[in-house]
Image: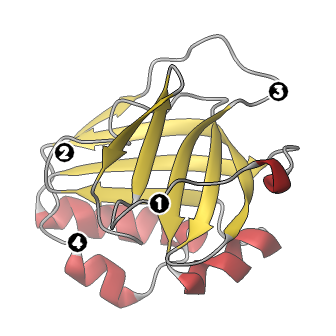
Amino acid sequence: MRSECAKPSRRRTKPELRHLAVVSRCFAPLLVAGRKQIESRLLQTRKPPLGCVQQGDGIGFKISGGEMIGVWRATWVREYHDLRPTDVDALRREFNRWICAPASYWRERRRSRYAVLIGIEPANLSRARITPPRLFGTAWVHMLGGSLKRAASRQP
């Protein structure tokens, strides 16, 4: 397992909304209560959020098939490459306390080759201003220069 910290850019004190993450309804109360402190995406292929998220980025969270929950700020980002099932197991043991994912999440993603872990904290951005586009099954949207770059990844 090869781990890389995303390149630190100039730290953004006021986060800009740069990403939209779709999550399962079961994660909404955990996010709002502050129990879920790490957003995780385990991937089979190289696609966003891999290589897209930087410390300080704003991430809007939306319930799958539902409404916006709010905006969180990325406090740190770690990317993992060339994963094996034992590496995914190690990530679960080390980080699941803050990811708050059920055992089925880890079982379904055990053969992932890439992982992105993002430390998150609530941001002071109004969710009322955010109208997410229709995503058609996309679980992560990277907003680049005002345009949307969709990434179909499994929802946690």
Of marks 2 and 1, the one in the foreground:
1
Could you tell me which secondary element the residue under label 2 belongs to?
loop
Could you tell me which secondary element the residue under label 3 belongs to?
loop
Q: Local crowd at mark 2 within 10 Å, few (<14), some, or many (≥20)?
A: few
The answer to whether 59 is drawn above or below residue 138 in the figure is: above
Q: Which residue is mark 2?
A: 1
How far apart in space, not on screen, are marks 1 and 3 (Cα)? Answer: 26 Å
Question: Residue flagged by tag 3: what amino acid is it?
Answer: Lys
Q: Which mark is residue 27?
A: none
The answer to whether 8 is drawn above or below residue 60 in the figure is: above
Q: Which residue is mark 3?
A: 14
- Residue depicted at x 12% and y 67%: 111
- Residue depicted at x 53% and y 68%: 99
Q: Local crowd at mark 1 within 10 Å, few (<14), some, or many (≥20)?
A: few
Earlier sequence position, callout 2 versus callout 4? 2
Q: Which residue is mark 4?
A: 109
Question: Residue flagged by tag 2: what amino acid is it?
Answer: Met
Q: Nearer the viewer, residue 116 or 1?
A: 116
Q: How is the image coloured?
A: secondary structure
Question: Residue flagged by tag 4: what amino acid is it?
Answer: Arg
How far apart in space, not on screen, are marks 2 and 4 (Cα)? Answer: 15 Å
How far apart in space, not on screen, are marks 4 and 1 (Cα)? Answer: 25 Å
Which quarter of the figure has residue 109?
bottom left
Q: Nearer the viewer, residue 118 or 144?
A: 144
Earlier sequence position, callout 4 versus callout 1? 4
Q: Which mark is residue 134?
A: 1
Which quarter of the figure has residue 82?
top left
Residue 132 percent coordinates (x, y): 59, 54
Q: Quick check: 11 left or right of 88? A: right
Question: Residue flagged by tag 1: what amino acid is it?
Answer: Arg
Q: Local crowd at mark 3 within 10 Å, few (<14), some, or many (≥20)?
A: few
